[in-house]
Structure formats: structure tokens, C-alpha cells
Amino acid sequence: MAKGDWASALALLKPLAEAGDPAAQYKLGSIYREGAGLPVDYSSARQWFEKAAVQGYPDAELALGDLYAQGRGVTRSLSTASDWYRRAAEHGNAQAMNNLGAMAWSGDGMKGDPKAALNWFTAAANKGLAIAQYNLGLVYARGEGVPVDMKAAYTWFRLAANGGNEDALQAIDAVAPTLSPEEIDGAEAAAQEWRPQL
């Protein structure tokens, strides 16, 4: 099968998806969501994501949460989105953990809770998700749910920058003047020694 041969991909995936394979169901839902080789169809995407999600497939749980958060193919419901994100997070999905952290931080779709935001961002950041590392840096820099800790903020921003998050570079520049050279060296060393908890 050649790259971009969506007709062949659909021909292979559809029987597997119809037979109950959650990975095939998720991939088929992704094809409908992205409009890869056919028109975008959020309703069909939701149906396939839901079939995989009820089987505990974390990427499908995340994707279903995204559809509900955005109101694509479904009535927008941040509460339902957070339910699906929670399921995906419980299955180890770092992006879902970050999404729950953002919802707890902002109070969108759930009660605002800085401690819950800290916990979700920490869980996702420890898995190596750069956006969660950036968000965790913000939590420490602002002292939301924790005491202000600019050295910890710097460390998390450095990890996020190392993971490709461009906003983290600006955050490092903003935090660095608040730290001594020794604190910066310590934060840089902590970032170098850090390993994800997979």
C-alpha cells in the first residue's frame, strides 16, 4: 500500500473495525475526523472513536473528549469531555492528563482546582509531554496550588524547551533574572538529569 492510498487503508481498516478491533476503530475515526481521502465527517469519527473508547482504548478516549470539547459531531459538553479525558488519563494518556490539568486550572468543564491542576500537569509532565512541562512551569512561577518556586519553574520550562515548546524559551528568559547563577546551574543540572516516568 502506497503512502496516501486512503482507499486501500479504508479497505483494510473497515473490516477490522467492524470486527471490533479498537486500534482499527480509532484509526478509522481519525480518517473521518481528518478527512484523509474523504470528506471530514465528525459524526462518523465520533461513532468509531466511541466504539474504541468503550473498550478502553486511550487514544480514542482522548479523541472523543476532544470532539466533545470542540462540539464537533456532538453537542459541545465540557463535562462529557472531562469524563472522557479522565478515562484516557486513567489509561496513561499524557495529553488527556494535561487537558484535565488545563480544565482544573481554568475551571472550564469542572470546578477550578489549582491542586488538581498541579497533580494532572505533574503526571503529564513526568511522562515527558512538553506542553504539560510548560504548564507546570507556569504553575510554579505563579504559585498556583504551590508556593512560588522560580527554580522549579525554570527547570520545567527548560524541559519543555528541550521538548520543542517554543513558548518555554521566552518563559526561561522571563524567569532567569529572578535566579542566581548558582540556582540557574542547579535548574539546568536538574533538567539534564531528569528522565520521564513511563
Image (cartoon, helix red, strand yellow):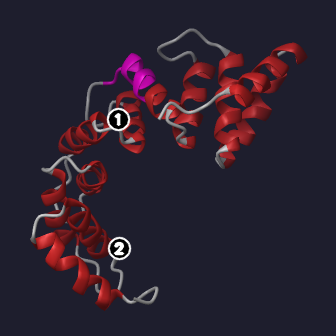
Q: Is residue 51 left or right of residue 115?
A: left
**Which residue position holds label 2?**
34
Q: Is residue 19 left or right of residue 147?
A: left
Of residues 28 and 63, which is closer to you in this image? Answer: 28
Amino acid type of the residue tagged 1 in the rendering: Leu
Q: Looking at the rendering, which quadrant does residue 83 occupy?
A: top left
Could you tell me how many numbered marks the image carries? Answer: 2
Q: Looking at the rendering, which quadrant does residue 134 occupy?
A: top right
List x then y, in percent, for residue 30. Answer: 31, 69
Magenta segment main secondary structure = helix
117 in relation to 36, above or below = above
Of residues 55 and 159, which is closer to you in this image? Answer: 55
Of residues 147 and 46, which is closer to you in this image? Answer: 46
* Residue lying at the far top of the rendered structure: 147
List x then y, in percent, for residue 35. Answer: 33, 79
The disc at residue 85 is none
As for residue 113 lying within the magenta part, the answer is yes
List x then y, in percent, for residue 160. Answer: 64, 39
As for residue 72 lying within the magenta part, the answer is no
**Which residue position holds label 1?**
100
146 in relation to 31, above or below = above
Q: Is residue 128 left or right of residue 17?
A: right
Among numbered discs 1 and 2, the one appearing first in the sequence: 2
Instruction: Tell me which residue sits at (31%, 83%) in the image.
Output: 9
The magenta stretch spans which residues? Answer: 112-120
Within 10 Å of disc 1 (Cα), the crowding (few <14, some 14-19, many 20+) is: many
